[in-house]
């Protein structure tokens, strides 16, 4: 991983700004001693988002998870967490729509393809619809700025996710920011019956995480 403690890295070169066809303006900056990627209105990778996803991963048994699918890679903070914090040696397939974010992941955060990491530039909704492989863990973390696109709440999307998760496998869904209980309940009603779930409200005061387990 990139040495994020380098004094040279913390020089006046930062923050750096980038134009994106998907996320409009992106910013790489130092924040509380960590290099992060932000959109105009929120943290996008590393920073508080990394903390949110780690909160969910802490509640999932990650031992013996051999294949992981990440839908919404961002700049790869969850990949860093899996490798460093959880010592995962799983094969990871990461899907990211924004080509600028994929380039920043490589150049600024050293998240690059390898024998155990495949990065695919594609819309996650289209990817899951055509995918045939199954996984032990699927992480769904798809935002455009502050919003999760509506299609990722749909029963159609979650029926496809259910097909791609192995029996006994888990899904971690970063479901949104400042969701109401009514919105969450409406989403839960759309889930396949063989996905049991745990809802974690107000993670770091704003995010809702949903952990799903395929039982048969």
Image: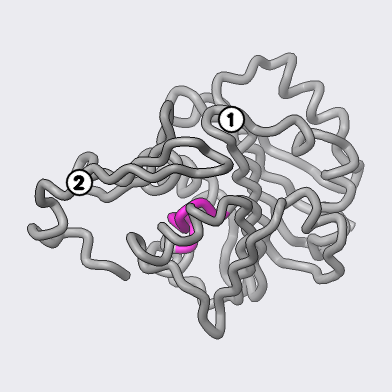
Q: Which residue is mark 2?
A: 14
Q: Nearer the viewer, mark 2 or mark 1?
A: 2
Image quadrant assignment for residue 199? top right
Magenta-colored stretch includes residue 200: no
Of 207 and 149, the residue lying toward us? 149
Of 45 and 16, the residue lying toward us? 16
Of 216 and 78, the residue lying toward us? 78
- Where disc 1 sits, the SS reads strand
Image quadrant assignment for residue 37? top left
x%, y% of residue 177? 55, 25
Magenta-colored stretch includes residue 77: yes
Question: Which disc is residue 208 wearing?
Answer: 1
Colour convention: one colour
- Residue drawn at x 86%, y 28% is 189
- Residue drawn at x 46%, y 40% is 52
x%, y% of residue 121? 64, 61
**The C terminus sits in image quarter:** bottom right
Image quadrant assignment for residue 65? bottom right
Magenta span = 73-79
- Residue drawn at x 68%, y 16% is 181
- Residue drawn at x 79%, y 35% is 151
Q: Determine whether 174 is above or below 139 in the image.
A: above
x%, y% of residue 185? 77, 22
Q: Is residue 57 left or right of residue 132?
A: left
């Amino acid at each position: 991983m990139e040495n994020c403690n380098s004094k040279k890295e913390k020089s006046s070169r930062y923050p750096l700004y980038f134009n994106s066809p998907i996320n409009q303006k992106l910013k790489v900056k130092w924040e509380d001693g960590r290099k992060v990627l932000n959109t105009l209105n929120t943290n996008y990778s590393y920073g508080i988002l990394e903390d949110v996803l780690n909160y969910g991963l802490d509640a999932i048994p990650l031992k013996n998870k051999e294949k992981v699918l990440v839908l919404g890679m961002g700049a790869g903070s969850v990949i860093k967490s899996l490798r460093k914090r959880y010592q995962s040696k799983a094969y990871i397939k990461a899907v990211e729509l924004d080509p600028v974010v994929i380039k920043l992941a490589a150049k600024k955060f050293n998240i690059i393809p390898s024998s155990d990491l495949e990065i695919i530039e594609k819309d996650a909704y289209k990817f899951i619809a055509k995918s045939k492989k199954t996984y032990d863990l699927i992480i769904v973390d798809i935002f455009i700025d502050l919003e999760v696109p509506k299609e990722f709440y749909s029963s159609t999307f979650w029926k496809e996710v259910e097909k791609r998760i192995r029996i006994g496998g888990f899904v971690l869904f970063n479901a949104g920011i400042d969701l109401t209980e009514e919105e969450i309940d409406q989403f839960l009603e759309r889930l396949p019956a063989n996905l049991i779930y745990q809802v974690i409200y107000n993670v770091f005061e704003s995010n809702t995480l949903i952990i799903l387990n395929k039982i048969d």
